[in-house]
Image (tube, helix red, strand yellow):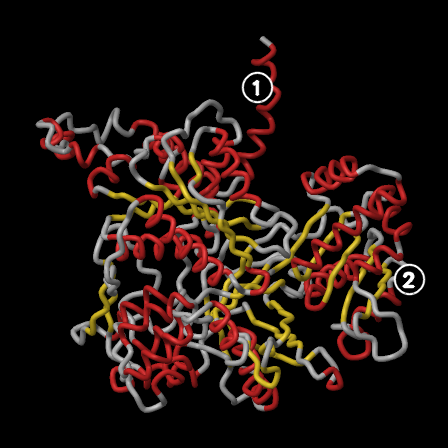
Amino acid sequence: MSSVQDLRSLEPLLLKFTEKAAVDDILCLLLLLIAGTAYTTKGLLWEKPDPASKIFWERPQLKSGNAHSQAKKQTLAEKIQEIDAKFVLLWGSQSGTAERFATRMGKDLSRRFGFKSLVVDLGDASPDQIQQIPSTAITFVLLSTYGEGDPSDNTAPLWDWLMTASGQAMSNLNYYAFGLGNSHYKHYNKVIDAVVDKLNKLGAKQLLPTGKADDCNGQTEEHFVSWKEDIFKHLISQHGYEEKPLRYEPSIKAEFDTSLDLIDLNTGTPQHDVSAKKTSMALTDIKPLSITSAHNVFSDSAGRTCLHMEIDLSAHPEIKYQTGDHIGIWPVNPAEEITSLLDRLSLTSQADTPLLIQALDSETKVHVPSPTTPRALFTSYLEICAPISRQTISDLLEFAPTDYAKSFLTSLLTSRETYEDFTATHYLTLSRLLTHAAGPDQPWSIPLSFLVETLPALKPRYYSISSSSALTPRSVSITAMIANTPLPKNPSSSVPGVCTSYLHSHLPSVVARAQDDSAPSTHLQAHIRRSKFHLPITATAPLMMVAAGTGIAPFRAFIAERHRVSKNREVGDMSLFYGCREVEGEFAYRDEIGAVEREMGGKLQVQVAESRPKTAGKKMYVQDLIRERGEEVVRALVEENRYLFICGGASMGRDVLGTIGEVLMERKGWGEEQVREFAERQKRTGRWLSDVWG
């Protein structure tokens, strides 16, 4: 009864509405009513399904049982049995290095001993399948550690399973282990250590102590080669394997094909590696972005260049970023190295001829775009300036064009010390090595397939964005130190950074464009990588920021954004602890940050440590400054519960966290366990964040 009364009470309103409603409004309501009726009656009153339509989708071969191979995916054990593999290589990788090493190891084992190898992505092998690897096969486990001691994305399923497994579930496994890490990080090679410990407790038999690569001084490749040599010796002496004469056996083919349409060629545009699905989801598409300005943020007296570069996103509205994200710059190799390598390989006349690169079997992955050209391959797709390992020198022996060239390469392989002495006095790239060995006029006949398989793929270099998305949403800035690393035994010669040299090479054209609008604009290929290194949502949350060198980049953005917000509402206190060589010449953005500090009236406090002061000041690193200000640091992190952000080199980040722990023990009287629990809780709740690099 009450519902009827409610409807009657609405009657005057409905009459009033219909009196005032426009004709087109009523027509619109009628159309919506008709459309709704049509949608709900589809398949009942109209467009009834054909009962015989299923015939079009039936697959008769399934009924006859002839499609078993299509319906069932091969297990790991079945793959091993099918190719009679004696060696199984399991890899877990975030950046691709462990994958590349596993692939190379598999090829070397097959070439050296004449038995098949199976290289397996851990993301494609469940723990159940690993348990089924026959004990007659020898397994190799190659795992990287990244971030805060985290496993790679494709290692995560095995990692999670191992942490709860018990019994003798892995008693079938006879294995060698190799880890990739960086001792500048606190959790150096944590993943391989934890996995080996669990595998052994589950009954697996480890055949040799774990090999480890330490990338802190760029020696990952050399450590891998040394481990591999130990493995080969062990297989011969303890397992009875016999070596075969070594010859290059390609797993891909690279052939010139002039029938290819030029429009289909990959001539420099980079591509994401989509194999790491979780990582690729955090990346935007790669686009050509315009450089609008660039200048040195160090003073001329510093003698070093720190490049501030503004990059325009306006042409690509789909690309967005947040303050604290990273930008990935895809470099190109130096022109002189490209020209020299083409010349050494007698490819100058074919530099722009279409080149088709294909795998020779289903297990091999091609890590460069195809079809392409030799020029594009050496310019944008291969690391032709990568360090040359002893393994690569050994593999080049069979292609030596003269006896002298072979003798020269052999001399570098006499001992590890001989090789290290030569590379400590000579900047060595592939083209430079070929020139040293045979002279500038002697051509080499090296298959392009060998170079594609041997040289690493050219990867993007990541930089912390130094602009605020709230202030400049369509423009990104980066802060990059131009890298020139002096050779240890020949300081007058140095190794230039591929990407920073590439960025610096754009400086003249950017300056010319700023002076003359008609000058051509300069572009580079780049993408945004999302990070978790973001300001707290609440503007009143207090911050403690610690940086050294170009680690100040994201904090420039944090400070600028908080400064803008402070003009309209309250913001939390901020403290910046910054380490640089000397304040006068190398405090990046000194004037800009100093002006904000004065204007914010105590809301921002900046303290600087100089490691190479020009005056009589005290030599100090940023972690020393934190220890000196221990009482202030404890108050900020414990009593005020400030967010802690650390950005810079990995060794600096490790030392800063270690110093904070020591200060907490000294000032609060905490034990090591209490400090560890406090730090882990802060990290787990997102209050302590690090953005550090090798």
Question: Distance from label 1 to label 2 (Cα)?
Answer: 63 Å
**Left or right placement of residue 665 versus residue 100 in this view:** right
Query: Which labelled disc corresponds to residue 601?
Result: 2
Name the quarter where the N terminus is drawn: top right
- Return the residue nearer the eye: 266 or 300: 300
Query: Horizontal and vertical percent for residue 11?
Result: 57, 24
| Residue at point 85%, 65% (across, down) | 597
Residue type indicated by callout 1? Leu
Residue 91 visible here? yes
Query: Horizontal and vertical percent for residue 353?
Result: 24, 79
Whether residue 189 is situated above or below residue 619 in the rendered picture: above
**Left or right placement of residue 224 versus residue 365 in this view:** right
Residue 591 visible here? no
Q: Are marks 1 and 2 in contact (CB under 8 Å)?
A: no
Which residue, as the protein is rendered here, is positioned at the far top? 1
In the rendered image, which quarter is residue 649 located in?
bottom right
Whether residue 139 is situated above or below residue 377 in the rendered picture: above
| Residue at point 54%, 68% (across, down) | 314
The secondary structure type at the circle numbered 1 is: helix
| Residue at point 25%, 39% (across, down) | 79
Q: Which residue is disc 1 drawn over? A: 7
Residue type indicated by callout 2? Gly
Callout 1 crowding tier (Cα within 10 Å): few <14, some 14–19, many ≥20: few
The secondary structure type at the circle numbered 2 is: loop
